[in-house]
Image (tube, helix red, strand yellow):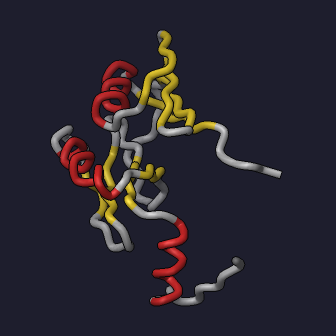
Amino acid sequence: MITGINHITLAVKNLEESFRFYQDILGFKPIAKWKKGAYFLAGDLWFCIIQDQNISTFQLDYTHIAFTVSEQNFEAMSNRIKHSQAIIWQENTSEGASLYFTDPNNHKLEIHASDLATRIKTSKEKPWEGLEFYI
């Protein structure tokens, strides 16, 4: 049985540029760095970047990784991301504050200042078509 996410690894074209983005813009804590990769902590999440010249270009689908940000820090983090030249790929339409952006390698990311309990509560109040709950 799976008990959680062990780590996330993203391929990057330019290790130094990506390292600076994740450390300086998103505030991840660097743990280790080597010629072709780096490890970070984002809260309790083990996050890895690996240099790979074969990464895909911008994807048109909705697939993305969302990171939790407190409501108090959301505006400051959003401003830092926007001033980093990150591409904003979608406007927020969900409950809670969200910013949808890309990293320097066009990986789709999000910062979100809400949680699953709030999402469930909101979706029960305004259910999506065909919505079923199992909890």
Tell me the residue at 47%/10% (across/down): 35
The residue lying at 54 percent from left, 77 percent from top is: 120
Q: Is residue 105 left or right of residue 55?
A: left
Percent of width and height locating residue 121: 51, 80
Q: Quadrant of the C terminus?
A: bottom right
Q: Is residue 48 left or right of residue 20?
A: right
Choose between 81 and 12: the one closer to the eye: 81
Q: Residue at x 53, y 29 (%)?
A: 48
Q: Residue at x 66, y 82 (%)?
A: 133
- Horizontal placement of 13 versus 90: left or right? right
Asked if 22 appears above or below 34 in the picture, the reply is below
Q: Nearer the viewer, residue 44 or 126?
A: 44
Q: Is residue 65 left or right of residue 86?
A: right
Q: In this view, does 126 lie above or below 114?
A: below
Residue situated furthest front in the rendering: 72
Q: Could you tell me residue 113's position as x and y percent?
A: 38, 59
